[in-house]
Image (cartoon, coloured by chain):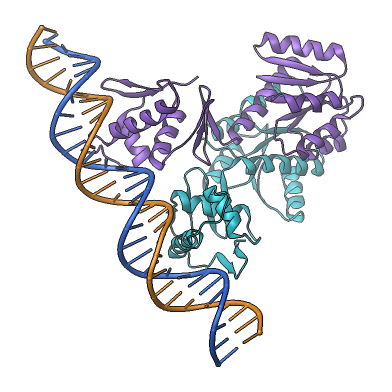
Chain colours: A cyan, B purple, C blue, D orange
Amino acid sequence: MEILIAEDEIRIAESLKKNFLQAGHHALIAKDGEETLNVMEKIQFDVLLLDWRMPKLSGLEVCRKIRSTGSEIPIILLTALTDISNKVEALDAGADDYITKPFSFDEVMARINAVARRYKSSVSTITFGDNTLNLITRIITTPKAQIKLTDKEFDLLKFFLDNKGTIISKESICEKVWDLPFTPQTNIVEAAVKNLRKKLEEAIEQKFIKTIYGEGYIFFGD
Amino acid sequence: MEILIAEDEIRIAESLKKNFLQAGHHALIAKDGEETLNVMEKIQFDVLLLDWRMPKLSGLEVCRKIRSTGSEIPIILLTALTDISNKVEALDAGADDYITKPFSFDEVMARINAVARRYKSSVSTITFGDNTLNLITRIITTPKAQIKLTDKEFDLLKFFLDNKGTIISKESICEKVWDLPFTPQTNIVEAAVKNLRKKLEEAIEQKFIKTIYGEGYIFFGD
DNA sequence: TCAAAAAATGAAAAAATTTTCATCATTCTT
DNA sequence: AAGAATGATGAAAATTTTTTCATTTTTTGA
């Protein structure tokens, strides 16, 4: 996970960073509010740990600015204050959570996980390999191009992605993608698979759908 | 908003309920863990306020049981304990937030709003009137029927729904729905609006898209 | 290795969607 | 109230998507 630590107290920031790295995550430190905004423009993070008291721009102001750009990145405010009005202010400013100092690293980590889990499930995309399918726009973003899927292509790919790595029978594809209770007399499934393969392989030089003779298909990705 | 208060201390529960009603929400009280689960099976709520210490089943157990059913309803735990391990436990059990007693009503309300807002944005549907558009399947569920939208119908309706109640110019529709930087020479927008209106009005006897002469359109719903 | 079964493919056909265009209706301005 | 501008509509045309079908290729097992 990519974590941005916006904290001016070097000791606290460094200690957090060390712990994050140890836990297998990546972490970067921003020393004030302005730097936080600058860094966030350039790099995508999964979570922002944001100190309430910081030079130049307060955490609250940073929080509001970020939300005003439309970003929904999970933000956890670090605060030394405990009075209720500040908690309310924090949530109203668009923070997802806050932690009162002093805190243990375990608590920080638990909250980051909770908040990131929620965020992930709220983003309507599915990733496979270096590619991302946006479930709303039905556009696949690859490192090189964008692919817009048709209705059937989308339904089929989504079914594959929802069952990544497991064998999928043609019967189950018929049921899910065409809503047919019976297996059709034509080779409609094979044809649809062919169309999808062609579309994917034209843009991404990689094979995703493997045929299991006599059984069905498997989708590989990650 | 529909709020379920799972709390065995009658005084606290009643006080919360009174405040919620005053704030224009609906609230129901469940007196123990079992009752909470029973009520939740029958009625859909927007938020669950869940006391940690309750007879029969603890809040934590209730929380786990609810999550194990796959429900993602926002849960806020009410706890009298302050030690860190319990906070971590709460979040791990699947709670979205927790409030330490004693709390002010303002804090409860702020957290409910924050958590409900997040939940809402994570559900991939948009509601208008008695109808719900599923953004993934692109199916509108009305009290009477299901309508499957085509590509352009969906793009257009989504743009309308994202801008409910405000005037939308044809130029902005061109930009958003067709990605055109210029206004086309044909009446393509009017035609698309016509098609969408027809589809909606065939299934729902109600007019949603109003024309503002010389300006554009407004979508009504709610 | 060979025949049978299963799957893939290209091209045509069919179906659905989107766009255009000519015409009709409505709204606004004076 | 009349003319001009704007918007709505039905039907046809164009385009795109989906399906079918005949044929080729691949896989499996004897």
Q: Position of residue A174 (x, y in %)?
A: 55, 53
- Residue B119 versus residue A24 in the image, above or below: above
- Residue D4 versus residue B156 in the image, above or below: above
- Residue A104 versus residue C11 in the image, above or below: above
Q: Position of residue A106 (x, y in %)?
A: 81, 44
Q: Position of residue D5 (x, y in %)?
A: 16, 23
- Residue A57 visible in the picture: no
Q: Residue at x 41, y 42 (%)?
A: B151
Q: Residue at x 69, y 43 (%)?
A: A117
**Left or right: A198 as drawn, with respect to A16:** left
- Give the position of the C terminus of chain A as an image quadrant: bottom right
Q: Residue at x 61, y 52 (%)?
A: A162
**Left or right: D3 as drawn, with respect to D30:** left
- Residue A89 visible in the picture: yes
- Residue B183 versus residue A169 in the image, above or below: above
**Left or right: B137 as drawn, with respect to D6:** right
Q: How many marks?
A: 0
Q: Nearer the viewer, residue B4 or A48?
A: B4
Q: Nearer the viewer, residue B210 or A106?
A: B210
| Picture quadrant of residue B211 | top left
| Picture quadrant of residue A168 | bottom right
Q: Position of residue C14 (x, y in %)?
A: 35, 53
**Left or right: B40 as drawn, with respect to B120:** right
Q: Residue at x 80, y 40 (%)?
A: B92
